[in-house]
Amino acid sequence: DAKTTQPPSMDCAEGRAANLPCNHSTISGNEYVYWYRQIHSQGPQYIIHGLKNNETNEMASLIITEDRKSSTLILPHATLRDTAVYYCIVRAQHGSSNTGKLIFGQGTTLQVKP
Amino acid sequence: EPEVTQTPSHQVTQMGQEVILRCVPISNHLYFYWYRQILGQKVEFLVSFYNNEISEKSEIFDDQFSVERPDGSNFTLKIRSTKLEDSAMYFCASRKEAGNQPQHFGDGTRLSIL
């Protein structure tokens, strides 16, 4: 699975959009981009994933560049409860050649401030 | 919304004792995982399990570890003879099917070895 690079920390003002970048320049054609977050002392929480098209759900939007070498997770109106470590993970589709395990990096610690 | 549940939330055990961590995955999920997170470190993959057998395990998952799905609803992780360095958060995750579907995590068991 391709390696990802994320900034170690970011701040965001409450009510503003939080834009979390991720570089995955070695991503291959069958690899998806997944975003999870971990609020202190809790298990990782799935946010969103995508292959090449932009995706949106009730939690966030995922913007993937056309060359797929980077992506941005957007939390449109950050709240204090969005303070967490955000992980960008690239993983091939689970199939006969892999078991679907996730490889976590250090992630980005997002601090939402009042 | 269905969720992965783990018990106990906190387990304290003497070094050398056996411990069993329990997980109830989401009911229609077929793929199961254990991860651990030592305090202040990354979330690390331990093992994946499908169709009543281990499909992949990491170097961490040595002979002291075992997993079982004893009754079609529970998924357990056993550590036979615990060591101080086994102290960590242990997370269970499950997934519905192969492909690109995400894993969903429980809130973990904090294992403290004395």
Image: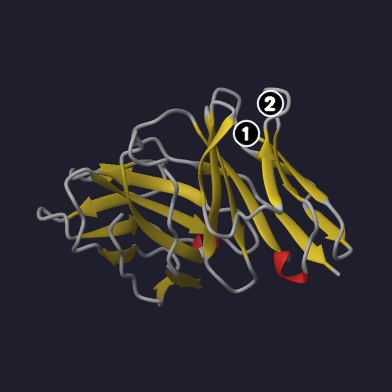
Residue A29: x and y in percent read 16, 46
Q: Is residue B104 left or right of residue A99?
A: right
Viewer-proximal residue among B73 and A75: B73
Which residue does the numbered mark 2 point to in the structure image? B73
Q: CA distance from mark 1 to mark 2?
A: 7 Å
Name the quadrant containing residue A99: top left
Q: Is residue A74 left or right of residue A9?
A: left
Q: Is residue A49 visible in this depiction of the protein? A: yes
Is A110 displayed left or right of A81 in the figure? left
Work out whether B56 lies above or below A109: above
Q: Residues within 10 Å of mark 1 (few under 14, many from 20)?
A: many
Q: Quadrant of residue A54?
A: top left
Residues beneath discs 1 and 2 located on the same chain: yes
Q: Quadrant of residue A22?
A: bottom left
Number of the label disc, if any, that sits on residue B25: 1
Would you say residue A76 is visible in this rendering? no
Along the viewing direction, whichever of B32 and B63 lies nearer the viewer: B63
Residue at left offset 42%, top offset 48%? A47
Q: Residue at x 61, y 36 (%)?
A: B3
Mark 1 vs mark 2: which is more N-terminal? Answer: 1
Question: Mark 2 packing: few (<14 Cα in 10 Å), some, or many (20+)?
Answer: few
Image position of B86 with respect to A58: above or below: below
Q: Secondary structure at mark 1?
A: loop
Helix, strand or loop at label 2? It is loop
Measured as percent of width and height from the top left, residue B9 is found at 77, 51
The three-letter amino acid code for the residue at tag 1 is: Pro
The answer to whether mark 1 and mark 2 are in CB contact below 8 A is yes
Please, which residue is most extreme toward the left here?
A67
Query: Residue at image x 73%, y 28%?
Result: B70
Chain ID of residue with mark 1: B
